Amino acid sequence: MNVFEHEKGDLAVARHLASLLRTEGRYEDALKVMAECVEANPDNALAAAALGDMYVYSWRIDESIDAYREAIERNPSLNEARVSLARAYLVKKDTEKAMEVLKDLIEEDRPAPEALIAYGEAKLKSGRVSEAIESFESAARDPESDYLARIWLSKALLEIEEYNRAVREAQLAVSSRPTPRAFAALARAFMKSGRGSDAKQSIERGLTSSPNSPDIFCAHIELKLFYAERTEEKDEKLNLYKEGLQMAAESINIDPFHLNSYLLGGHCALSLGDFEKCAEFWQKAAELDRWDPMLAWHLALTYQEKLGEPQKAASYFQRHIELDGEHAEEAESYLEK
């Protein structure tokens, strides 16, 4: 039976099939399945929202925004589409638009926990940490959403160096739902607290339950970097970077759209002095996330200073400037040379 021989109008079937195709690495086929489902259901807002989710996974953010807008047009009361639209804007670092989309939902008498979490994400990305914490705390009161809210709350608490409380919130997230993401959050909180052995335990628990999770792989790479920064033994340091680099490659093989795997892989390669490999990782990351000014800056410097390729560096210096990066003046001086 051909994989596309299914009832295109059945949203549940389309979602399941798209998920299977994505697992097999057939991302374009997965998108095709969901696009056909949207076409076959011209009034179904959930179908359009599901297509938006598929676009987000593939880092086709502008297309995801169009899909979520279509979902909202089809059903203006579909709040999950509004939350997803806000998160898509956050990927583009447009916190103002994200908060504008969420404004009506947040002002309700009893805001949906998902909206509170997304609003908190926007506040956190805007540097308004105390307001972000308030949003996450409010969302954590709902037993259906406390898991995700506490993961974000732990992250926000790390920003203000409340390490012990960050650990507690991540532990509660693990207790609520022992997922790779929760174990990774707990490991990061332990690392920030200087508790490497506890972080290692969290990662091992995550690997036991989900041995092929990129989230756990990345937490493990961060643990390698944690130990590399604390050892004076050159050989041990190099081995840790090499192990981290290998883990990044394995994680990318599992999920070629996992941004953090590319970022960490580039960090390990840079630490090893393998500048070509570093640029390879970060260039792929920059292809996925076109809205990160610091990624553009570091990639430009790698091409300019480490590889002696000013032409390649120029496009990323330009991107940093266009994104209003904090090193815009310095980037302009490089372009004028």
Image (cartoon, helix red, strand yellow):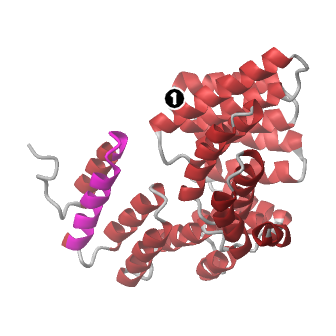
Q: Is residue 230 visible?
A: yes
Check residue 36 for magenta coloring: yes
The front one of 23 and 104 is: 23
- 116 drawn magenta: no
Q: Which residue is mark 1?
A: 210
Total marks placed: 1
Task: Give the residue displayed 72% in from the left and 27% down from the top.
Answer: 241
Residue 277, image x, y percentages: 62, 38
Q: Quadrant of the C terminus?
A: bottom right
Question: Quick check: 35 left or right of 336?
Answer: left
- Tell me which segment is drawn in magenta: 22-39
Vertical relation: 51 (above or below) 158: below
Instruction: Give the amino acid type for the residue marked by disc 1 in the picture.
Output: Ser
Q: Is residue 21 above or below residue 318?
A: above
Most foreground residue, 142 or 103: 103
* Image quadrant in which the N terminus is located: top left
In the image, farthest residue toward the left: 1
Residue at coordinates 72% horizontally, 65% vertically from top-left? 317
Dividing the picture into quadrants, the one containing residue 318 is bottom right
166 or 300, which lies in front?
A: 300
Q: Give the secondary structure at mark 1.
A: loop
Which corner quadrant of the image does residue 86 belong to?
Answer: bottom right
Residue 182 seen: no
The residue under the point 84% across, 38% down is: 192
- In the rendered image, residue 265, in percent from the top left (x then y), is placed at 64, 38
x, y (%) of residue 211?
A: 51, 25
Write the residue at 69% across / 40% down.
275
| Secondary structure, magenta segment, majority class | helix
Q: Position of residue 236 (x, y in %)?
A: 80, 16
The 10 Å Cα crowd at callout 1, few under 14, some 14 to 19, many 20 or more, is: some
